[in-house]
Amino acid sequence: MRIGVTCYPTYGGSGAVATALGIVLADRGHEVHFVSYAQPFRLGRFYERVFFHEVEMEQYPLFEHPPYTLALAVALHDAARTHDLDLIHVHYAIPHATSAWIAQQMLGSDGPPVVTTLHGTDITLVGIHPSFQPITSFSIRKSDGITTVSQFLKDETVRDFGVAEEDIEVIPNFLDTNVYEPGKEPCRRDTLAEPGEKILMHVSTFRPVKRVSDGVSVFAAVAGRMPARLIMIGDGPERPRAVERAKALGVADRVVFLGKHGAVGELLPCADLFLLPSASESFGLAALEAMASGAPVIASNVGGLPEVVPNGEAGYLVESGDLEGMTDAALEILSDPDRWKAFSEAGRALAVERFSADRVVPKYEDYLEKVVEAHRRDGAPQG
Ligand code: GMT
């Protein structure tokens, strides 16, 4: 297939998964054209059969908010025409599903089918907002195929967006288990922490939904009981609050804010514990990356996380905001080497068996091919 792929190029799970999928599909012989306003952050080098098309944005003084949705539609239209695309696959509905639908309309009966992969807040937080809900619902229902990254997200989409259950395929996120691997070089504990300190880690976009300050509070309670250090990876609006929390709790000297990092697979193998105290999480790719790297996970019992982290096997799921529960769970794992080892091994095994690229990418490939065939058979949708 010749596939056009649109995703957010910035630091974040949906862009990470979209890029990984494009790279593996190209490796399997497909031609992949990324169309976005910047090069996806994990597309850092040359891959055969992978192309990048930057969306051109015309600046004009009248535009306080330049119409990216339209510019993207034109770029998708052009890519579809120039490269004879068989399919447009967009990740994150807003505004990508809308742009793809516009491009399809512009192409008329020659237009390729559109598949929209829903990732999380495009449904649960942003998509549900009254200013976006009607257009999000319209655009995803116009897609020729819809996938969600968890059963939880499928249920939310069916309930709140009027999409029929049978029109959504659940395909979980995945990762390269050779990139996320226990003991992987060049992670060196001595570069991150003092000898004898347990390393707790958090990776996110530091948006309010991630409750990063909760992670700092849990860490402070753990650090009161054993030598420990918290490594915070990522950046976003909640970082200043997390810094303040660390100061207020007297642990600022043991909380390291590394900022954004494009290759977290290099750091995660050093983690003794991964914290994901989110208020909502449709999947929790960061938790999966930690498990694959051998780190037990303490996460909130919300959204799709129970589909990724089996409670009591690879970590513990605790109610969101229950700082005491998270602290107890963390101390239990960190103070019992046998339990730590069992959780670490179980997380790794699960990542390999259920969420490796080998297991998941063929599901995407089959689904995308099915959509292309149906479109060829039944023709382009009318309007
Ligand atoms: O929806 C978002 O918050 C953005 C998105 C991203 O780009 O990071 O995160 C979502 O998609 C990820 C990849 O599928 C999931 O692992 C995250 O759980 C999900 N975030 C939320 O649901 C809050």
Image: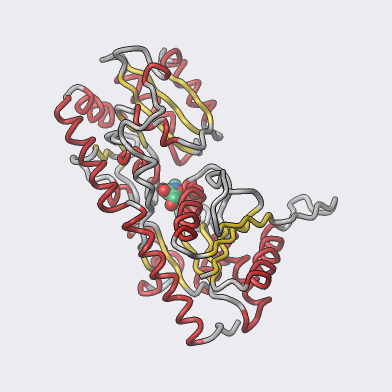
Q: Is residue 173 left or right of residue 142?
A: left
Q: Nearer the viewer, residue 157 or 176?
A: 176
Residue 152: percent from the left, percent from the top? 34, 57
Query: How many numbered discs?
Result: 0
Residue most toward the right? 61
Residue 85: percent from the left, percent from the top? 59, 71
Residue at the image point whose x is 35% and y is 58% from the top: 360
Residue most toward the bottom? 378
| Image: 256 above or below 202 | above
| Image: 368 above or below 310 | below
- Tell me if residue 123 can be seen: no
Residue at the image point whose x is 37% and y is 40% from the top: 180
Residue 248: percent from the left, percent from the top? 45, 16
Q: Is residue 274 left or right of residue 383?
A: left
> Which quadrant would the C terminus be assigned to in this image?
bottom right
Residue most toward the left? 338
Q: Nearer the viewer, residue 273 or 85?
A: 85
Residue 201: name its quadrant: top left
Q: How is the image coloured?
A: secondary structure
| Image: 327 above or below 207 | above
- Tell me if residue 156 can be seen: yes
Residue at the image point whose x is 39% and y is 40% from the top: 278
Residue 108: percent from the left, percent from the top? 65, 81
Q: Is residue 148 left or right of residue 86?
A: left
Q: Nearer the viewer, residue 22 or 277?
A: 22
